[in-house]
Amino acid sequence: MVCFDPPDDPIAAPSSWVKRFAPRISEGGTVLDLACGRGRHTRYLNELGHDVVAVDLDVSGLSDLMSRESVEVIEADLELGDWPLGERRFEGIVVTNYLHRPLLPRLVESLAADGVLIYETFAVGQEKLGRPHDSAFLLEPGELLHAFTPQLVVVAYEHVTEVEPRPAVRQRICGLTSDAFARAQPRDSAPTPANGR
């Protein structure tokens, strides 16, 4: 399992994409931080008041979190082992800088009825700018959008080339279950989501 989180920076800032959409997760809901790396999003989401389940092959960077009752750390190989979370469901799932395509359907299945998926990782074109270079870790144009529609209501999607904090080509998506989308809407308005549903 390869995670391309910022290297060896225990205080790396949370992704702006995660920060933008984390408020859509139900207050007090449990969040899965998948391929959590050194735990920058685990810490951020826990500070927002969420219980967090943090999963990665190497959890050595999470030692300061293991004593928190509100953080569950699971050491697991997501690519070679069995799915380590059984039938558990989460109000939020966050994935950044990680791609293992066979897990994409599992993420939808692991959302609670009012769940929110926040996903951000590298896309084709990144190989010209830096790691990762291998196409196994790079999304094709529109791949995240196609992977999660029509199962989720996509409220935001981007495929961008960015300069800060380092040059990168990324895809990002925020998808909601239909219950989560309905919960978020004022009763007298119904804006059209990104995928037109």
Image (cartoon, rainbow, N blue to C red):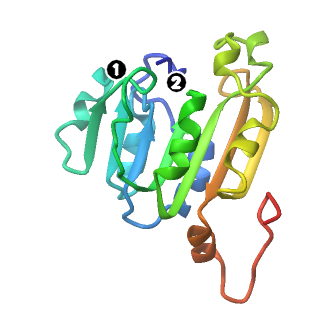
Q: Quadrant of the C terminus?
A: bottom right
Instruction: Give the residue drawn at x 75%, y 45%.
Output: 145
Q: Amino acid at mark 1?
A: Asp
Quarter occupied by residue 33: top left
Q: Which residue is mark 2?
A: 5
Q: Nearer the viewer, residue 40 or 24?
A: 24
Q: Earlier in the sequence, mark 1 or mark 2?
A: 2
Quick check: 33 above or below 77? below
Taking 47 as reference, is 95 left or right? Answer: right
Taking 21 as reference, is 42 left or right? Answer: left
Q: Nearer the viewer, mark 1 or mark 2?
A: 1
Quick check: 112 above or below 67? below
Question: Badge 2: few (under 14), some or many (20 or more) residues near its Cα, within 10 Å?
Answer: some
Quarter occupied by residue 91: bottom left
Label 1: state its secondary structure: loop
Q: Which residue is mark 1?
A: 58
Q: Amino acid at mark 2?
A: Asp
Q: Horizontal and vertical percent for residue 52? A: 34, 48
Mark 1 to mark 2 CA distance (whole Å): 12 Å
Question: Badge 1: few (under 14), some or many (20 or more) residues near its Cα, within 10 Å?
Answer: some
Label 2: state its secondary structure: loop
Q: Horizontal and vertical percent for residue 114? A: 51, 67
